[in-house]
Image (tube, rainbow, N blue to C red):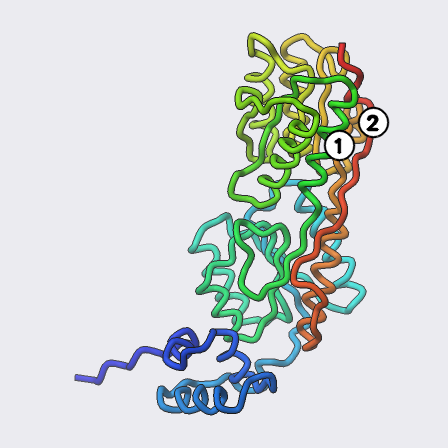
């Protein structure tokens, strides 16, 4: 009977045996100089003892590609991110590979297999949780990672790009309070997303600063898509004492609220004011044009692409966490409270 092949050792195993972090082992494997001599010697000895097979140097050559990975691609929000990444990639002579993994482990593994075969200079994850095994594999391949709008806690050692979501939520709510609204409904985004939680925290902070109590009956769950904006709008408008304004934490949900208002025989902003978040291109053409918080989506994509390309060249980035400013864009969907 043929001998069973010994399991392949991973850098996580080597890190545990050496009593160091996975990034330290990765730096030793890739010949980085920022490792203490004693640590390097201990890691090298363990790599040799366990028969760790290093990649040939040719695998570190530039592939001329960037990977842009989303959970889903069924949103104009994703299109704006893609536009920003592609602008920088094209100017740098680099191609862009766009993938959607749909929050499924099998899809993530399929993407990883394809990326191994063709190579990549760097990966940008958008609203994705980069699980530790995937992080370790990308370090093993010496592939830099940047995360846009991290899903939960950001990946270890991965720079993150976001927007000032708390400030945006605060400003939108302050604007409605300034118009005289005292019962302001809120439709939240997915609770696992840091950006969603920050927008809701900004909403609450504005209420508290104005001496208004936070009322859970005025808060509806959502997922950033039209359907939950519509269902949230229906529920809020059906309350015995409905709000006079609704802040939806995405533009798509705000447009869902528009439909709920229309089906009830009411009008925006005559009967209820509505504010969104994102400033997608379509909202300036809806009726009435939507007041919203502009999130610089294309700029976020551009910065993510510049950052990952710098990392691919071995350069350092100034800050591991960058937040681009949001801005309230006032149009015609909110007016003075009656």
Which residue in the structure is indicated by mark 2?
A: 331
Q: Residue at x 29, y 81 (%)?
A: 6
The x, y position of residue 252, in whole percent, is 66, 32
Residue 287, can we see it? Answer: no
Depth check: give the residue in front, 180 or 306. Answer: 180
Q: Residue at x 77, y 61 (%)?
A: 88
Specify the quadrant of the image occupied by residue 273. Answer: top right
Residue 111, can we see it? Answer: yes
The local secondary structure at tag 2 comes to loop
Give the side of residue 7 with respect to residue 127, left or right. left
Residue 78's tag is none
Q: CA distance from mark 1 to mark 2?
A: 8 Å
Q: Residue at x 67, y 23 (%)?
A: 211
Looking at the image, is 80 positioned above or below residue 321? above
The x, y position of residue 18, in whole percent, is 40, 81
Specify the quadrant of the image occupied by residue 285. Answer: top right
Looking at the image, is 20 positioned above or below residue 317? below
The C terminus appears in which quarter of the rendering? top right
The local secondary structure at tag 1 comes to strand
**CB atoms at circles 1 and 2 under 8 Å apart?**
yes
The x, y position of residue 254, in whole percent, is 67, 27
The N terminus appears in which quarter of the rendering? bottom left
Depth check: give the residue in front, 192 or 181. Answer: 181
Looking at the image, is 137 positioned above or below residue 322? below
Counting residues from the start of the chain, the first of labels 1 and 2 encountered is: 1
Depth check: give the residue in front, 39 or 105. Answer: 39
> Label 2 neighbourhood size at 10 Å, few (<14), some (14-19), many (20+)?
some
Considering every residue shown, the one lying at the far left of the view is: 1
The x, y position of residue 100, in whole percent, is 56, 51
Looking at the image, is 203 positioned above or below residue 178? below
Q: Residue at x 59, y 57 (%)?
A: 125
Residue 292's tag is 1
């Amino acid at each position: 009977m043929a001998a069973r092949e010994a399991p392949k050792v991973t850098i996580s195993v080597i890190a545990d045996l050496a009593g160091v972090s996975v990034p330290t082992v990765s730096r030793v494997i890739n010949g980085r100089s920022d490792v203490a001599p004693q640590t390097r010697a201990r890691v090298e000895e363990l790599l040799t003892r366990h028969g760790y097979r290093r990649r040939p140097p040719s695998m570190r050559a530039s592939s001329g590609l960037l990977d842009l990975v989303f959970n889903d691609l069924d949103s104009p929000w994703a299109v704006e991110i893609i536009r920003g990444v592609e602008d920088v990639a094209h100017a740098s002579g680099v191609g862009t590979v766009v993938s959607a993994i749909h929050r499924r482990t099998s899809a993530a593994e399929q993407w990883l297999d394809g990326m191994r075969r063709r190579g990549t200079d760097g990966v940008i994850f958008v609203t994705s949780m980069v699980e530790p095994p995937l992080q370790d594999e990308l370090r093993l391949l010496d592939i830099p990672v940047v995360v846009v709008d991290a899903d939960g806690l950001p990946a270890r050692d991965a720079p993150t790009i976001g927007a000032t979501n708390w400030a945006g939520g605060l400003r939108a709510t302050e604007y409605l309070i300034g118009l005289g609204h005292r019962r302001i409904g809120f439709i939240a985004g997915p609770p696992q997303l840091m950006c969603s939680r920050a927008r809701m925290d900004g909403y609450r902070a504005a209420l508290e600063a104005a001496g208004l109590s936070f009322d859970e009956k005025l808060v509806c769950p959502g997922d950033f898509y039209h359907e939950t904006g519509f269902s949230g709008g229906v529920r809020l408008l059906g309350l015995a004492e409905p709000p006079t304004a609704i802040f939806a934490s995405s533009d798509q949900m705000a447009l869902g609220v528009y439909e709920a208002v229309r089906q009830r025989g009411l009008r925006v902003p005559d009967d209820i004011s509505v504010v969104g978040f994102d400033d997608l291109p379509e909202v300036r053409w809806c009726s009435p044009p939507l007041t919203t918080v502009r999130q610089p989506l294309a700029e976020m994509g551009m910065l993510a692409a510049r950052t990952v390309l710098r990392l691919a060249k071995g350069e350092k980035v100034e800050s591991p966490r960058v937040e681009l400013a949001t801005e309230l864009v006032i149009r015609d969907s909110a007016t003075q409270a009656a």
